[in-house]
Image (cartoon, grey):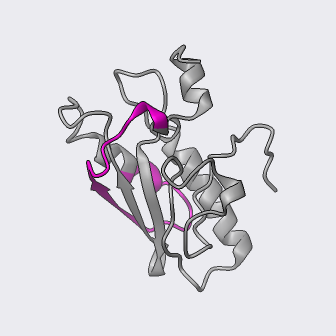
Amino acid sequence: MRDDTQTPERDVIDLGAGGPPAADAAPSPETAPQSAGSDPDLPPGEIERITEDVIAALKTVHDPEIPADIYELGLIYQVDLEAEGVLKVEMTLTAPGCPVAGEMPIWVKDACETVDGVDRADVNLTFDPPWTPDRMSEEARLMLNML
């Protein structure tokens, strides 16, 4: 069971929905990570556990120049869990010239592959749409004194 007092509303990567999260689960489609598919063979309880574990894993990855994790910064655009435990992650960086552009997708892959039920993570880096500070959660804004 999720403890919503500790998890902001935007913390939704719904691996079981087969589409974007419900409107009441995230502030807007532009600012919340999306899932376009899931492994239909997993029971809903397992999907929920994997979802929570993937979010926790993503929150362990930090941009070394910004004191916030990549999930709260809004760098994760989409996460799909496909058959046989393949997790597809689409992400961006705060800027195309980011010094860790070659390393951060590897950090995301390694973090996601620690999740029980994820056998392989494929991370795709995109700059379309470009990241903007509007994608950050309130938690990230607070950490960066932007509130």
Q: Is residue 38 magenta?
A: no
Give left or right: position of 35 versus 122.
Answer: right
Q: In the image, residue 70 lies at what x, y percent?
A: 44, 38
Q: In the image, residue 80 lies at what x, y percent?
A: 47, 68
Pick the front one: 35 or 105: 35
Image label count: 0
Quadrant containing the N terminus is bottom right
Q: Is residue 120 magenta?
A: yes
Pick the front one: 41 or 25: 25
Rendering quarter of residue 101: top left
Is residue 52 visible in the rendered structure shown here? yes
Quadrant containing the C terminus is top right
Q: Provide the residue span drawn in magenta.
A: 109-134
Is residue 113 visible in the rendered structure shown here? no
Q: In the image, what residue occupies the spot 37% across and 30% down?
A: 63
Rendering quarter of residue 20: bottom right
Q: In the image, what residue occupies the spot 56% across and 62% down?
A: 116
Rendering quarter of residue 98: top left
Q: In the image, what residue occupies the spot 55% across and 24% down?
A: 141
Q: In the image, residue 128 lies at what x, y percent?
A: 28, 52
Pick the front one: 103 or 146: 146
Rendered view: 35 above or below 5:
below
Give left or right: position of 109 versus 139.
Answer: left
Give left or right: position of 98 versus 32.
Answer: left
Q: In the image, residue 53 lies at what x, y percent?
A: 60, 54
